[in-house]
């Protein structure tokens, strides 16, 4: 059972990260589209569908499966896994970034975007950095 949950957890994480890396890139291009234009409306649909159909369900699955894995590993093993505590903190930060991106989807949908392309290019790197740190913690288990 543990290995099946772990496999589905990894699939959910990959799906979540794919969306988290693509959504800010859509924002970069959306910044160029005049409000109300056909192009802007297309980006709104793409952003909303990406968030609702992929990113949100993948995040929920990631959390549920991850918590199930922790439960199966047992309390004593969890207490001794410092790397897992650090991973959980980083996943909480990733979830906060997810919430921030969700807000930007709503801002674009209402034609209220006030951020620049440069801002979204920088924001696009945050999930990447978090992902790298999380993977290193999971594979290397430094503490």
Image (cartoon, rainbow, N blue to C red):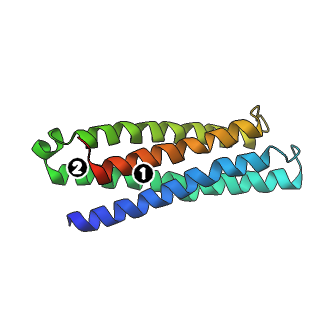
* Residue 106 showing in the rendered view: no
Q: In this image, 86 relative to 94: left or right? A: left
Q: Residue at x 17, y 43 (%)?
A: 78
The quarter in which the C terminus is drawn is top left
Q: In this image, 103 relative to 85: left or right? A: right
Residue 18: image quadrant is bottom right
Question: Which-is-in-front pick, marks 2 and 1?
Answer: 2
Indicate whether 10 appears above or below 108.
below
CA gap, disc 2 and disc 1: 15 Å
Q: Position of residue 134 (x, y in %)?
A: 39, 47
Name the residue tied to disc 2.
70
SS type, badge 2: helix
Name the residue tied to disc 1.
60
Q: Position of residue 83 (x, y in %)?
A: 27, 42
Residue 90: image quadrant is top left
Who is closer to the viewer here, 26 or 51?
A: 26
Q: Residue at x 56, y 50 (%)?
A: 20
Q: Residue at x 79, y 38 (%)?
A: 111
The quarter in which the N terminus is drawn is bottom left
Which residue is situated farthest in the top direction here?
Answer: 114
Q: Position of residue 126 (x, y in %)?
A: 55, 41
Q: In this image, 15 relative to 67: left or right? A: right
Label 2 Cα neighbours within 10 Å, binned few <14 / some 14-19 / many ≥20:
some
């Amino acid at each position: 059972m543990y290995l099946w949950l772990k496999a589905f957890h990894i699939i959910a994480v990959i799906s979540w990260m794919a969306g988290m890396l693509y959504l800010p890139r859509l924002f970069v291009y959306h910044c160029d589209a005049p409000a109300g234009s056909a192009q802007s409306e297309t980006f709104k649909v793409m952003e909303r569908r990406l968030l609702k159909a992929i990113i949100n369900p993948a995040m929920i699955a990631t959390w549920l499966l991850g918590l199930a894995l922790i439960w199966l590993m047992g309390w004593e093993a969890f207490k001794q896994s410092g790397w897992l505590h650090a991973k959980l903190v980083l996943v909480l930060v990733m979830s906060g970034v997810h919430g921030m991106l969700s807000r930007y989807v709503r801002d674009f949908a209402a034609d209220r975007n006030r951020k620049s392309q440069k801002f979204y290019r920088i924001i696009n790197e945050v999930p990447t950095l978090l992902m790298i740190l999380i993977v290193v913690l999971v594979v290397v288990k430094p503490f």
